[in-house]
Image: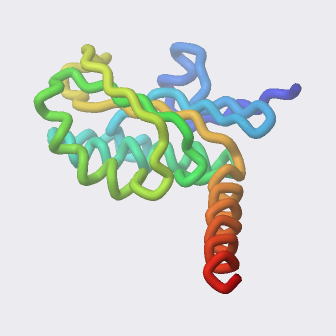
């Protein structure tokens, strides 16, 4: 099976020797994304704003891989201050509320003290469409039972 490497253009990827995402078959593995805006280098001090930027970074990697946030099946959040994690929940719910991936939160230090959250995901390309198809099929079966 072939492997496609995706870069965000961050010099950090070259310095360490990793890819923002790796695609093999329908699987997409997105490396941990922090709240840095890779274009400007800006990093908000607010965890909710960092979470928003993390997910923009994740979405950009998924888009480059031919997928979307709806295709995410697994997400891992790493936060240095677990007490602050609930402040990011509204952002996370807005991005993942429909996909509802399996999730884990780890409380651990990040590379820089100003980093408040890191988000890593695994996605299956096209799984959102499959989910929608299954839901439509189930709805149709329910309607047929009501009519019959």
Q: Depth check: give the residue in front, 133 or 139.
A: 139
Q: Is residue 84 above or below residue 81?
A: below
**Residue sitting nearer the eye, 25 or 19:** 25
> Where the C terminus falls, by quadrant?
bottom right
Left or right: where does residue 89 sit relative to residue 84? right
**Image point 29% across, 52% down: which residue?**
91
Work out which residue is located at the far bottom of the displayed protein and give it: 147
| Residue 86 percent across, percent down from the top left | 17, 40
Q: Is residue 135 above or below residue 69?
A: below
x%, y% of residue 23? Answer: 72, 33
**Residue 146 on image: x %, y %:** 61, 81
Quadrant of the rendering where the N terminus is positioned:
top right
Q: Which residue is drawn at 59% across and 19% down?
A: 18
Q: At 35% across and 30% down in the image, what residue appears?
A: 77
Q: Which residue shows up at 26% across the image and 39% down it?
A: 43
What's the image's color scheme? Answer: rainbow
39 sits to left or right of 7: left
Q: Quadrant of the rendered structure where residue 109 is?
A: top left
Identity of the residue furthest to the left in this view:
83
Give residue 11's position: percent from left, percent from top.
50, 27
Looking at the rendered structure, the number of numbered marks drawn on it comes to 0
> Looking at the image, which residue sits at the far right?
1
Residue lying farthest to the front in this orientation:
148
Residue 68 placement, left or right of 52: right
């Amino acid at each position: 099976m072939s492997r496609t490497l995706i870069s965000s253009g961050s010099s950090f990827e070259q310095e360490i020797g990793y890819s923002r995402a790796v695609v093999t078959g329908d699987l997409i593995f997105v490396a941990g994304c922090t709240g840095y805006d890779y274009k400007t280098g800006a990093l908000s001090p607010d965890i909710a704003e960092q979470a928003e930027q993390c997910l923009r970074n994740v979405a950009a990697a998924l888009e480059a891989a031919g997928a979307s946030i709806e295709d995410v099946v697994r997400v891992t959040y790493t936060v240095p201050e677990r007490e602050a994690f609930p402040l990011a929940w509204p952002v996370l719910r807005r991005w993942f509320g429909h996909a509802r991936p399996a999730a884990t939160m780890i409380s651990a230090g990040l590379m820089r003290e100003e980093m408040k959250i890191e988000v890593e995901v695994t996605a299956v390309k096209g799984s959102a469409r499959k989910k929608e198809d299954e839901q439509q099929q189930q709805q149709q079966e329910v309607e047929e039972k009501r009519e019959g």
